[in-house]
Image: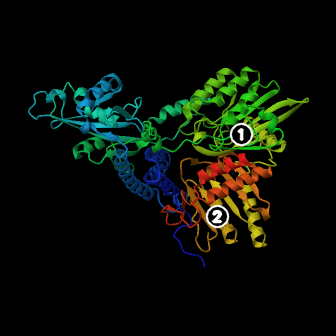
Amino acid sequence: MIQKIKNQYINRELSWLQFNARVLQEAADENVPLLERLRFIGIFSNNLDEFFKVRYATVKRIDLAGREGKNALGGTTARELLDQITEIVIKQQSRSLKTIQKISKKLEEHDIFIINEDQVTEDQDDFIRNYFISKVSPALVTILLNGLEEFPHLKDSAAYLAVKLSFDAKDPDLEINRAIDGKIYALIEIPNSIERFVVLPEKDGKKFIIILDDLIRYCMRTIFSIFDYELATSHMIKITRDAKLDIDSDLSKSFIEKISSSVKLRRDGEPVRFIYDKNMDSDTLSFLMEKMRIDTTDSIIPGGRYHNRRDYMKFPDLGNKDLVYPTIKPLRIKGLSLQGKLLEKIAKKDYLQYTPYHTFSYTVKFLREAAIDPRVRTIKITIYRLAGISDIASSLINAVKNGKKVTVQIELQARFDEAANIRYAEQMQREGVNLIFGVAGLKVHCKACVIEREEEGKLKRYGFISTGNFNESTAKVYTDYTLFTANPSILKDTNKVFKFFEINYKVSRYKHLLVSPHYTRSSLVKLINKEIRNSKEGKQSGIQLKLNSLSDYDMIDKLYEASNAGVKIELIIRGICCLIPGIKGMSENIQVISVVDKYLEHPRLYIFKNEGEPLVYISSADWMTRNLDRRVEISCPIYDQDIKQELIDTFEICWSDNVKARELCIEQDNRYIRNEKEEVRSQIATYDYYIKKLED
């Protein structure tokens, strides 16, 4: 009998908010080091900013267009969903504020004090005023609002202090100052060029920090010294804008010019969220909302005293190493030396790099070696997000200077990294790198590299395929698999993908790789169908997936079908999961967990049990409609038996987590998995697994 439920799917946006709630859980977890808890507050806040810029903005556009969007939105109207999102976010913001207050109290037990403008001592006064005059004041933008015909444009996600100066109503200068009912309103933009947390001189072993907002409040008299006001109040506000890119259709412009222009226009995107200090005076709030023309489709969030809590990601550690996670040294890959010849080793067997447990230096070393190897003729690579200072980019430029033909497929529409990618694209183009800007209508999200090296009069291919970006910065905190291989079958298929970038109308047949948008979906369906047949025939079956997101309804339906056929399905989903597990007659054979811990779980891994001879793939593709149908993605089969077992082992370690794993279920309550088994914190256990491999 089928257990009755209202919908077969969890709404995508609401599922994402539950993921962010898991991030907030880490901030509230007293077992997490205190400064790491603050940084999780920053991650939570940064995630929320991006959510409103992209997802909330999309739903708002559906609503404004007069479309209900029930099918796409999981059975609810756009208007209903906007209201649900706002309600949930208000509750989450309240929890985050309470969490910060608890953390601040705990920090005081370690002689770290976060003070406000009312707690400044005489000893700190000189330092603060000198700091303000020398560093802050020159960077301040202060705008008087009274009498302005047009309200100033507020920058997306910038923080502003909304100031009200109150005067004696009989003051003869009021008319000159254009005061409204004895008040002058102003905005002060908090400069993002200055560190948000100002460390004050230490005293008696105690450390003091004042937030930049409060330092500005303390110096309010200096800012408005030309006014003889009686009282000044200041409360923070923030606007979040729609981040959609509108691409110019002007055929005379290059693609770089079009994207660059669109990124600049994004600054004028429609507001989608207005956050204000809930203690703001009602007259100030009314004045602002009227002048800013905040409408009913905007999410209006009463918040705390401080916004842009994403800055907590950069909270200073003050030398207190016991208040942060211990540094874990990245390991070497067994059998692969950074001081030897990588290509010589890779020619003999495949190797797996699993960052950050392994050092990312192998990826850089591969390209550095190729750049100076006289026998290397060509290098082809896809780039989605580069580090701010990229050894990858410099290696590719180095290769060009050594006469190699270097082709880079760079995705200029990598959301929020467009400006950085444009900068690198222009730099590489100047140096002679052959740039490809993708395929019309498709984002290129796959992570692959192929080089050709002349050996014994023939060209031999080497390369790597990854689940994550070739980015030194994120490789320290994102878990990702990279396969180094000289397998001619895999690299022949990979080379066909690069040919597709150059000749878009020609779609190749791939014998080994699963490539979106042409074959991934159909190939995955075939693999699931095989597990269904095996189950029905009494053979060994099962599906294990590790993904960032699972939201494609057709693929979810296929997993439901497999569940009903008796296939045991284990899913590790970090973020969005629209599938509802554990429902009798629909998904009773499906379990879903999510792990949120020190590192961000980023790899995509597919395992199909296949009658006891597992088929294993690493992939850049989540099971979302965009990844399957609107992006170029690569899923790579693993043929090396040792690496295949390594991937199965690391999946099992993560699946066994009973410290940082949460069960995803219809209640969406993010309950932790706790059991009587030996405690397993999967990220620590995975590191120990690789240490043991080196010792064996």
Quadrant of the rendered structure where residue 360 is? top right
Of 480 and 501, which appears nearest the observer?
480
Residue lying at the far bottom of the rendered structure = 1
Give the crowd class for mark 2: few <14, some 14-19, many >=20 residues within 10 Å: some
Question: Can residue 542 be seen in this snapshot?
Answer: yes
Residues marked 1 and 2 touching at CB (< 8 Å): no
Q: Residue at x 60, y 37 (%)?
A: 385
Amino acid residing under circle 1: Ala
Instruction: State whether residue 305 is above or below residue 368.
Output: below
Amino acid residing under circle 2: Asp
Residue position marked by numbered label 1 in the rendering = 448
Q: Residue at x 48, y 61 (%)?
A: 76
Of 36 and 282, which appears nearest the observer?
36
Query: Residue 626 at what x, y percent from top left?
Result: 62, 49
Query: Residue 500 at what x, y percent from top left?
Result: 75, 39
Looking at the picture, the colour scheme in use is rainbow
Quarter of the picture containing the N terminus is: bottom right
Please tell me whether mark 1 or mark 2 is closer to you in this view.
1
370 displayed left or right of 151? right
Residue position marked by numbered label 2 in the rendering = 557
512 displayed left or right of 438? right
Secondary structure, mark 1, is strand
Secondary structure, mark 2, is helix
Query: Residue 376 at what x, y percent from top left?
Result: 80, 28
Q: CA distance from mark 1 to mark 2?
A: 30 Å
Question: Can residue 150 be seen in this snapshot?
Answer: no
